[in-house]
Image (cartoon, rainbow, N blue to C red):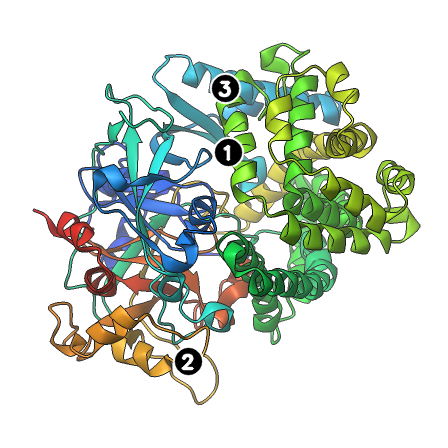
Amino acid sequence: MSWWLGFVASASEGMWSPEQLTELGPMMAEEGVKIPPAEMADLARGPLAAVVSLGGCTASFVSPDGLLMTNHHCVAGYLQGASDAENDRYTNGFVAPDRAGEISAGPTARAWLIEHSVDVTDTIVGGLKGKLSDAARADAIEAAIKREIAACESDGAGRVCEVSRYYGGLRYRMDRAVEIRDLRLVFAPPAAVGDYGGEIDNFQWPRHAGDYSFLRAYVAPDGSSAAFDPANVPYKPTRYGKVDPTGVSEGEAIWVAGFPGNTERYATVWEVRPVIEVAYPLAIVRMKELVALLEGYAAAHPELAGKVLPQAASIGNGLKYRQGVLASLAGVDLVGDRQAAWDQLVAWANADKKRAKAYLPALEELASIERAAGDRLVQEGLIGWFGRFARIFSASHQVYRWSLEQSRPDAERDPGYQERDRADVEASLAQVPRVFVPGAERLIVGKTLEWYDALPAAQRVPALDAFLTKHGGASAAVDALYAAADPAAPGAAFGQSPEQLRSSSDPWMQLAIVMEDGWYAAARARSEAEGGARSRVQPVVMEAMLAASTGNVYPDANGTLRVTFGKVEGYRPRDGLVATPFTSVAGMVAKHGAEPFVAPQPLRDAAATSAKSPYVMPALGDVPVDFLSTVDTTGGNSGSPTYDAEGRVVGALFDGVFESIASDYVFMPDVTRSIHVDIRYILWSLDALGGHAVVEELLAE
């Protein structure tokens, strides 16, 4: 399974960086892609100029007037924020009657279009002194990154820049992006279409979900990036994808571009073991409870379902992912395999005196670092959950951190707390009241603190214990916190000094201060020191892995722009079963019945004549709904445009299959499949659901 020694990526394997594409001509040709590699790699004029990040999802321009196509589940948070008791836009969907009726996706909605990428390795780590302490080394790298970003953004062109690590810090690249801050909802199908099948069908095949939605990007009249304003105008992309209403057929070449989040194919046994053996099994038990709590609350408060169910779906997706990883590893000893790979790498280094001197110390030190990090995984994960679910706490902590950082020169502040981040921080604070549902949140925060209360003494946080004791225990503390819950309070306190915030009587702010002063600050210091140590040893270990490999080796996914190639193809999920690559409208109707398989009446009405639709697939005799492919993708690729061999839009990627979820750790070519919503179903269902204007825009010449 592990391929650190003698590794060469297979044709469909790999999430390749744009700068690698010029070296992949033979592989691209073998896959059937007809676009010249140099053209595909051109971020300014090539097809990648149509692909944007939504921050956790991907979207792509599909019209000259800034129309963006992505997944329905990628806009669930936008629909949640735009819903109220009278308008449940998540459940019922949204259709803008015209351009003027397109509504804001919310203050935190962003799109980033990468226009330039450059290697900055020498600038970031080339001048580091060998005698630096690990903490000083981490500080020096952070300072170098900030200098690069500041220089990149200094021209006042309204661009944002970001530096990312590749190959464990062996390489660094900086991306410069156009940031679009005014995104508006254009069309979202009802949840019964976008999430047809719900958690039952999540990561499953056959699938019949219309997981697509449309946004529009807006900018100021002069073309500059601007927050929502009625005077803004649609963004004019330099490149957009042309839709091919004839779609693709079995065996046809496709490729996908997007922003995959994280893979762990180079992770060591010391990183993998605590995740697979401890963290995932525990998270599965707990996430089941959280989903049940949220779904129960939504059932009891249907007027708030549009705000609660998207979070339940998000947690449920994470639950299904972890279940899938463990299930698809049932026949694979990943931990044992990584142990064997590590032993082989050590033996390879030991076989040569120069290699032993160059690599063995780093191998030993990295193992020690990762073992220590694994011991803290449960505690840090639980505190991370609390911060994620308790929105007022998270916002209050952000406000307090901001106040502390203001005493330092801007260049010395931590990332996320510089002046360049002010607008984003203010937007995130403004978003809290839009999505806050106190009754539902209280349930899951209470449950999180209940789990914390059961931690062994060695994993507890004295500062948090003191706060809970002061308020009479975890249950009473939750009562006090939610009795004083004001989602607008953190935003109102933004900009106050640390002294002013410390005098606040708001228990949420008190808790944020206690946790920052009593745990987060020390945890960051430890993390920075570990980061400095990793920055020394991980590149050396990665260099050893690459030295033992041959051919082109792709980097692990890290949220940056990637391209992957494949074909439309089914698979054999298990002995005796064959999964064909397309599903149909007829199959969707055949599933119709009890929740979550309740197709809206307009779709069922249209299905009566779907076989005569202009979007019918001849080989299928019906309109195809979803299809399978061999492209190598992961979370973050959701919403990624699916292109045919000539670069025409034929669908949108939205999921993978259950049998290959563990491909984040180890690629399994026989079962690794991605699921895409077919462009023909998108066009057909748009017509059925009142999205005629979107169809006209997509098919306009």
Between the residue at mark 3 and the residue at mark 2, the CA separation in whole angstroms equals 50 Å
Q: Find residue 621 and report its horizontal and vertical position in percent.
A: 17, 80
In the rendered structure, the answer to whether residue 214 lies left or right of residue 555 reads left
**1 or 3: tag closer to the N-terminus:** 1
Query: How packed is label 3: few (under 14 Cα within 10 Å), some, or many (20 or more)?
Result: some
For label 1, the residue is 164
Secondary structure of the residue carrying numbered label 2: loop
Q: Nearer the viewer, mark 3 or mark 2?
A: 3
For label 3, the residue is 420
Taking the spot 48% from the left edge, 53% from the top edge, the residue there is 635
Query: How packed is label 2: few (under 14 Cα within 10 Å), some, or many (20 or more)?
Result: few
Taking the spot 62% from the left edge, 52% from the top edge, the residue there is 267
In the rendered structure, the answer to whether residue 266 lies left or right of residue 557 reads right
Taking the spot 65% from the left edge, 35% from the top edge, the residue there is 486
Query: How packed is label 1: few (under 14 Cα within 10 Å), some, or many (20 or more)?
Result: some
- The residue under label 2 is which amino acid type? Arg
| Residue 308 visible in rendering | yes
Say if 461 sits above or below 250 in the image. Answer: above
Between the residue at mark 1 and the residue at mark 2, the CA separation in whole angstroms equals 37 Å
| Residue 41 visible in rendering | no
* Residue 572, numbered label: 2
Q: Residue furthest bottom?
A: 576
- The residue under label 3 is which amino acid type? Arg
Q: Nearer the viewer, residue 426 or 167?
A: 426
Q: Nearer the viewer, mark 1 or mark 3?
A: 3
